[in-house]
Amino acid sequence: MESSTLSSYASLYSGSLEAEETRQRFEAALKGIREEFDDHLQSINDNTSEIEANYELLSRLEAKVDRVEEQIEKLQFTMARMFGGALLENAQESIELDEREKEVFLILYTSCGDKSLTYKEIAVAVKESDFLVRGYITNMIEKGVKIEKRYVNDIAYISLDAAFRERQAKENIVRLSQRTVSEFTAAAIPAAY
């Protein structure tokens, strides 16, 4: 009887040793997985910080480029006045915009008077991201649309140049068809702008 009890205890003891070894292996594997997750989390945090730093740098560069563009425009207008408007006569006869750029243009064109809009307000109106709206506006500037930007508390406020708005009204430089304007005015425009 004693030997059967001893063998029961021995089998229980060896079973508990196996369970303990299994538990230790499981904890070691879990610790390894946790370390890998921590490494991935650290990489994500590092990448996020780098992206934020790049975004801040690009924002500062964009602000500087905008200031340079404003100075160039002022110089062009000054030169045009000095030379009797000869430079303005050489301005483009028409500007071709794609459909999304036309939407952004119409939002700026129809905004209340000289009211400036932020990228976010325009993005809400066209149901696009701020990033895409920035791209559309950059493309419009490159194509010759006169857009004014001013910064208040590091927020860009965008509007059409008053002289360009007047010229568009008289000459339809952007070549907006009546259909495009009708579709735009028929669409529900968010109250964001």
Image: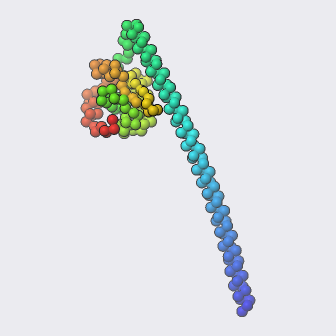
Q: Position of residue 160 (x, y in %)?
A: 36, 25
Specify the farthest residue to the bottom. Answer: 1
Q: Quadrant of residue 114?
A: top left
Q: Quadrant of residue 143?
A: top left
Q: Position of residue 54 (x, y in %)?
A: 55, 35
Nearest the viewer among 133 and 190 is 190
Q: Please, which colouring scheme is shown? A: rainbow
Q: Position of residue 141 (x, y in %)?
A: 42, 24
In the rendered view, would you say 169 is above or below 59? above
Which quadrant, please, contains the N terminus? bottom right
Residue visible at 62% across and 61% down?
30
Residue visible at 43% across and 16% down?
74
Specify the farthest residue to the right. Answer: 3
Which quadrant, please, contains the C terminus? top left
Give the total number of marks visible in the rendering.
0
Nearest the viewer among 155 and 158 is 155
Nearest the viewer among 86 and 115 is 115
Specify the farthest residue to the top. Answer: 83
In the rendered view, would you say 28 is above or below 70? below
Residue visible at 65% across and 58% down?
32
In the rendered view, would you say 5 is above or below 102? below
Examine the rendering and report whether any part of residue 96 can be seen.
Answer: no
- In the rendered structure, the answer to whether residue 183 lies left or right of residue 51 reads left
Examine the rendering and report whether any part of residue 93 can be seen.
Answer: yes
Q: Position of residue 5 (x, y in %)?
A: 70, 88
